Amino acid sequence: MGFQKYVPHISSSLKLAVPVMLSQLGHVMMGVVDSMMVGHVGAVPLAASSLANVAFNVILLFGIGVSYAITPLVASAHGEDDARKISDVLKHGLAINIINSFILVVIVIASKNILYHIDQPEDVVVEAIPYLSVITFSIIPTLIFQTFRQFTEGLSRTRIAMVAVIGSNIIHVPLNYIFIFGHLGLPAMGLVGAGWATLISRGIMAIGIALYVYSKDFKKYRHGFSFGNYSKSLVSKMLNIGLPAGAQFIFEVAAFDMSAVMMGWLGTKTLAAHQIAINLATISYMTTSGLASAATIRVSNELGKKDFTTLRTVAFTLLWLAIAIMFLWGLLFVFGKNFLPEFYVSDAEVITIASPLLIIAGFFQLSDGIQVVCLGALRGLHDVKIPSLFIFIAYWVIGLPLGYWLAFKMNWDATGVWVGLLIGLTLTATAMVWRFHLLSNKLKLQVAS
């Protein structure tokens, strides 16, 4: 049979994945648009947005990771056709995410002045702090949105979040233009204006999806909007999936954030170049992140049905799709290394530094696509703790120390840091493929025997 066995699953997988890809892209495009528009104000505001996101993204993505517990549990219950169980997951997920969002806001606000103590350019820190103070509050609407997003995606209704995110982006761009550059009688706020545009857009996005889920289409799940009578066992189950998933984001995103700190040690223009390369790599990552969400949904469905042969076939179909997509992204980054940075800045020195970073980004596209889809499939199997350990080792024990050594001891500068990231991603991808094959094959053999 060979490759032919994957063909029937391509269409159904893409039907789930494409709306998620577009919504993921839409979500990250807020940051991309911020960087592009702020970059035209100057290299310092662009570097400041990168530095602020060092503190912000790792916290926000931890919260998003915790919300990921909702999708596999909803998808499994959907496979069992158990509406009450689905409603309970929504109800408990909403409570967990609201509480978590307030905790995370307090953490960022309380620790933001750490930016003054990590040896970054002072003019960059001065611009980063006010921006960070504003976007931090967008954690609350983002995690409320994530609750309903993961819920609807668990029901295989992936277009709802896509529409909400696209709508928020349509609002975000003109708000950015008004607040950053000063229009309609408002003063030019620069980077802080981008923060306000993001906060308002995410608030509208959260309200929009909550109202839609409360509509008649989901009437039988309205129990999920109630408060009280929480189940300790369900909270524990969700946290056992969500907290390690959040830890995965911390280990991976914090590794990229630490690379930004190291870039700051090399200067403002190096940090600005790093922000450009990271922005572009994030766009490509989000396309396969959509495939990862589809992997979580479909693997969870098949797990609920106990069809482990189809479970493996579905996961590897999505893995092949990720490889194909990321190969194309890799080509774009390598051949577009000189013109892509021009969308962000006109500073020739920043573009010169960014170009070789995009070549390295091109090479790690395959590893990035493989690891994110395998992580999604493993979440579908409710396996999150061991993958978190693998990610920690790949980045923090091997990739980052090696990147530091290459950058500062071997004088490879920015290129050295990014080679360390390339190695960390490659090790992670290898470990995730091995882990998924091991677990899914074990389930398949158990049924066969």
Image: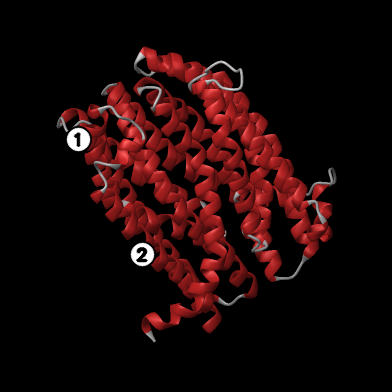
In this view, the residue farthest toward the left is: 410
**Residue for point 60% across, 65% down:** 300
Q: Crowding near pointer 1: few (<14 within 10 Å), some, many (20+)? A: many
Say above or below: 171 vs 161: above
**Residue for point 77% across, 54% down:** 88
Horizontal side, residue 301 vs residue 26: left or right: right
**Residue for point 37% across, 39% down:** 278
**Could you tell me residue 280's position as x and y percent?**
37, 43
**Could you tell me residue 207's position as x and y percent?**
72, 41
Name the quarter where the N terminus is drawn. bottom left
**Could you tell me residue 99's position as x and y percent?**
70, 35
Tell me the mark number nearer the camera, choosing from 1 and 2. 2
From the viewer's side, name the closer residue of 87 and 277. Answer: 277
Horizontal side, residue 352 vs residue 387: left or right: left
Disc 1 residue type (three-letter): Leu
Disc 2 residue type (three-letter): Ala
User: Which secondary structure, mark 1?
Assistant: helix
Horizontal side, residue 160 vs residue 115: left or right: right
Tell me how far mark 1 sits from mark 2, CA to CA.
Answer: 31 Å
Q: Quadrant of residue 262?
A: top left
Identify residue for label 2. 324
Kindly tell me whether residue 383 is visible in this rendering.
no
Identify residue for label 1. 406
From the viewer's side, name the closer residue of 143 and 401. Answer: 143
**Could you tell me residue 152's position as x and y percent?**
68, 57
Q: Earlier in the sequence, mark 1 or mark 2?
A: 2
**Residue for point 44% across, 60% down:** 374
- Total labels: the figure holds 2
Say above or below: 178 vs 400: above
Q: Crowding near pointer 2: few (<14 within 10 Å), some, many (20+)? A: few
